[in-house]
Image (cartoon, grey):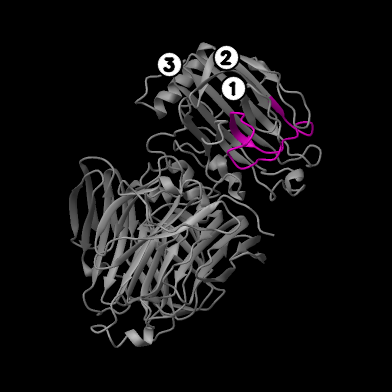
Amino acid sequence: MAIRRILSLLAGLIFLSGPSAARSRGKEFITAFLCNFKQHQTNAKFELLITGYHPATTVVVTANNSTFRKTIPVNEGVTVSIELPNSVEMLGTNVFDKTVLIRADKDISVSSHSHKDYTAGATVVYPVQQLGTLYYALTPEGDMPDTFKEFAVVASEAPTRVEIHLKGNVRFKGQNYPAGSRLVADLDAFQAIQLQSSADLSGTRVESTKPVAVLSGHSCAKKNTACDHVVEQLLPVSSWGTTFLVPPLSFQSQSDIAYVITAQDTSIRYQNGPTEESQSMVAGQVIQLDMQNPQPLYISADAGIQVLFFFTGATNGGSSYDQLIPLFAGAPEGSRIYDPFLINVPALTSYCRLYHIDGMRQNDNYLVIIANATETRLIKVAKRPLDSILWQPINGTEYSWAEYSLSTGSIALSVEHPSSPFGLFILGGSYRDGYGSAALCSCRSAPSSSALNPGGSAPTSPVLNSNEESLLYPYGTSNGDDKNPKSDDGISPQIFASVPFTFYGKEHHSFYVNNNGMISFGQELSEYTPSPLPLDGGVPFVIPYWADVHNRISGDVFWRQTQDPNVLDRCTKNINQYFPEIPFTAAWALIATWDRVAYFGSKAKSSKVNTFQAVLTTNRKASFVILNYADIQWTTGAANGGDPKTGLGGTPAQAGFDSGDQTNYYVIPASHTPDILNIGKTSNVNIPGRWVFQVNEFVTGITTDCFI
């Protein structure tokens, strides 16, 4: 059946994904350039686009095993192009010393472009702290003579052993490696191995002893039009997500392909139009889902998956490929041939509220935007609202998608929403050319400790670092907490605040702590089904994790209001850390903790339990909420359609804020989707499992909030 979900999708030149959402900003990057069509194809150009986020950033670009070394200044909001020598291209199957190293003294983001006449590819380059040790390759179709499916593994440390479990035949150093065999390569730092084959290599598993970058694609992929070089830097398995949406492209009159890859046995659900379908997948399997304009594709899975969108080529302007190919000079006005490209589709948890984009020179450039249908009017491009744009609903979701045409030629600008994350892609083409990629998320880089976690998971009691307190504030009866009754849909007595707490512009003097993961102001709220916001009932409330808790089965709900100096000092420290521009000294705090709570319908003493916490604090003027997610193992109670054995499925939990005025509210990304299970691995303050907001007037995150 069709399930209503909060989703988003397709992006512009960089952004990131689920459980350990990859981030594009960093200070050190390593990449390589796969073989682009033929070695002697004319007008070869290999370049990096480097975007600065701070004034006076110094960047050093070095081509390994070459005399090329360039130091450049990059300023805030500026994108600089660095052209590399043609010798960086890797030709054939071998181990190469042709990698490119980028280092900066402040955060930057990087994308790479590989261009030859009538063939070009572009990809995001992720910083080294986002690299992983387990990947699955994807090589789209295309069988022209002397073109190859290909991928490369780039080592950032020495020694790195790479084990490649092949899905197609490869010849390497004079030896044949058939499908099903294992190829082992030992790489030094800044070396790369490139494998090429006429056979499909999709689903090939790449494992390494140290973090590596993996780039995958085709030297010249071909389906509907001429061939074109396609390449994408892949995300490690630890950064995969479970919920995706892929919009169609308006100029595609035939079909495109969404590739889905899984690293473990799972079940996926997908919807392309009014009907939802499902399919079981086994570890390492790759499936293709055809996409027909104008229907978007929704995909959800029980475990992490990787989704790539393959644009198969199209003509734009009403003429067919066969009509246009001999008529470049005399083609009808407005007619174009856009050749194939490949995009690594970000998961729902990857969305940002601010992007930097760069269109390609001499190309028709387009944005594809995915946003909550209630938030579309607030999206701006280059600080200007999108007045004349057609938003189309996405079946089964609360989201809409739109395509927006930019000017032809090189262009750099920002796309933003003041508070709500959205998905963005940038893509385009010219005569017999095409490119596409996810957009540059203009936010802080994630901590390396979470990005390199190969399992993509957070411990039960996460530690911020060795010198800081645990994620959770102290709680329990030993710390003076009161405890809610053990009852289904139970609630605390009315708690009168010793200091007023301002929320959405109104002072509140009492509150209730609900077993089902809510704190309401002035009025009880005991609903167990997480309904879409805003509610009609007029009750203002904070929503750490609204789901059907049953603490009679397992767990406790603790709470206390406090003016203890130690607690207030910690609140002051945290808020000053995340909001340094706001003078703040805490005068009061409420700490509510849901400790190892089970879901309704689970078995007695269930091993599936959640631990999370809300800290409300104020200095009598400014008010803040700190949400801490220590261990999230379930999303849904049985009464909301969840599986009694797993606590998953049905109507998943949501987190956010509701002002009670039926207008103003805020929903944390992934709410009402299966990906809310990963909220303990995401953040808007770069600390996995922690979300912090100022709430006294409107709900706002930190000024550079991005969702790791």
The residue pinned by badge 3 equals 585
Q: What is the distance, in whole Å, between disc 2 and disc 1 at their CAs? A: 8 Å
Question: How far across and down, in percent of the image, does residue 545 sit?
Answer: 62, 36
Q: Judge from the rendering whether residue 193 lies leftward or rightward of residue 392; answer left or right.
A: left
- Contact (Cβ within 8 Å) of mark 2 with mark 1: yes
Q: Quick one: SS at disc 2? A: strand
Q: Is the N terminus in the top left, top right, bottom left or bottom right quadrant?
A: bottom right
**Residue on which the image places disc 2:** 562
Q: Earlier in the sequence, mark 2 or mark 1?
A: 2
The amino acid pointed to by label 3 is Thr
Instruction: Determine the residue positioned at 41% across, 75% down.
Output: 313
Task: Give the percent coordinates (x, y) of residue 68.
Answer: 19, 60
Q: Amino acid at mark 1?
A: Ile
Q: Nearer the viewer, residue 328 or 205?
A: 328
373 left or right of 108 in image: right
Q: Which mark, by number, is residue 591? A: 1
- 79 inside magenta stretch: no
Residue 220: which quarter of the image?
A: bottom left
Where is residue 327 drawn, in percent x and y?
A: 28, 86
Q: Which residues are magenta?
A: 528-557
Was residue 532 drawn as part of the magenta stretch in this picture?
yes
Left or right of 662 on screen, residue 51: left
The image shows residue 215, relative to residue 325, as above or below, that is above
Q: CA distance from mark 3 to mark 2?
A: 14 Å
Question: SS for tag 1?
Answer: strand
